[in-house]
Amino acid sequence: MAVAIRVIPCLDVDQGRVVKGVNFENLRDAGDPVELAQRYNELGADELTFLDVSASKHGRGTMLDVVRRTADQVFIPLTVGGGVRSADDVRELLRAGADKVSVNTSAIARPELLRELADIFGSQCIVLSVDARRSAEQPSGYEVTTHGGTKSAGLDALEWARRGEELGVGEILLNSMDGDGTRGGFDIEMLKAVREVVTVPVIASGGAGKAADFPPAVEAGAQAVLAASIFHFQEVTIAEVKQELSYAGYEVR
């Protein structure tokens, strides 16, 4: 039987509130994270992803509280990321109720962190978040970025995804920084390119604008599809996405 495609709302949390912008700029308030999480739980989300976009020490304390309160109310897997730098950070988030932890910038600075975390907590707990954009500077035509897509990490995105799998991550969250918040559709070419170099599940992120955008991402190799603003502002529902995927012949929960 085919593995069901997961539909995942993403909540970017800044000082305890969900925010959303275009290419991480002009952020606007999208509501209380726990209330939104409860709503998504009721509406059939398969998982939830929380990203702490402030990721300061203050932000971390706020985020732990958000995760605790959400885990008390919601019974679908929670992935949490933002400012994760050590095994202690992962441990804190798992104790607060996260099921998986997403790692980004700290792994770029020290790739061995991924192996350490996978060894301690298991590959199934560790997600490598790759914020990628098109670039003529890299062999594949895609580069890894940091700081909300504003800075180049000087890494080829395909090579970094492959390295992440080699170091033990269980999943890759592939976010198109060119597409983020634009609603122009997922970056299908980039998804296909990453799918060719890794075997772990890939989550497609960045650019969803309508329900019809989701099946092409799965056809390109994504095992899960993630979106934020179109869900937060109720322009597209999780049910509509699942219906579209089902019509296209994909298994959904």
Image (cartoon, rainbow, N blue to C red):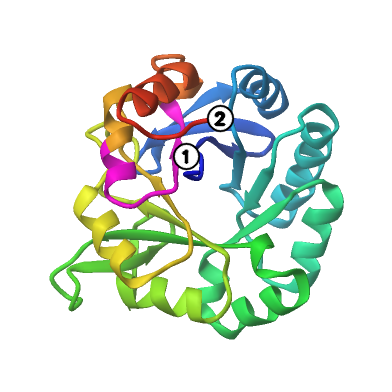
Residue 143 vertical placement versus 20 (above, below):
below
Identify the secondary structure beneath mark 2: loop
Q: CA distance from mark 1 to mark 2?
A: 7 Å
Residue at left offset 72%, top offset 27%: 34
Residue 136 appears left or right of 251: left
Q: Quadrant of residue 211?
A: top left
Specify whether residue 133 is painted magenta: no
Numbered circles on residues, count: 2
Of 170 and 48, which appears nearest the observer?
170
- Magenta span contains residue 219: yes
* First of labels 1, 2 by sequence position: 1
Structural crowding at the residue carrying mark 2, measured as other residues with C-alpha within 10 Å and reported as few (<14), some (14–19) or many (≥20): few
Residue 120 in which image quadrant:
bottom right
Check whether the beta carbons of the residues at disc 1 and disc 2 lie within 8 A of each other: no
Q: Is residue 228 visible?
A: yes
Please, what is the three-letter code of the amino acid marked with disc 1? Ile
Callout 1 crowding tier (Cα within 10 Å): few <14, some 14–19, many ≥20:
many
Q: As drawn, is 21 to the left or to the right of 156?
A: right
State the residue position of label 2: 253
In the rendered view of the protein, which quadrant contains the C terminus?
top right
The residue shown at (67%, 39%) is: 15
Expressed as whole percent of the image width and height from the top left, the position of residue 206 reads: 35, 43
Query: Mark 1 sits on what residue?
Result: 5
Evaluate whether residue 210 shows in this view: no
In this view, the residue in front, 127 or 25, is 127
Residue, x 27% and y 34% (percent of image)? 182
Q: Which mark is residue 47?
A: none
State which region is magenta.
216-229
- Look at label 2 and name its amino acid: Arg
Q: Is residue 177 left or right of residue 147?
A: left
Which secondary structure, mark 1?
loop
Q: Could you tell me residue 13's position as x and y percent?
A: 61, 38
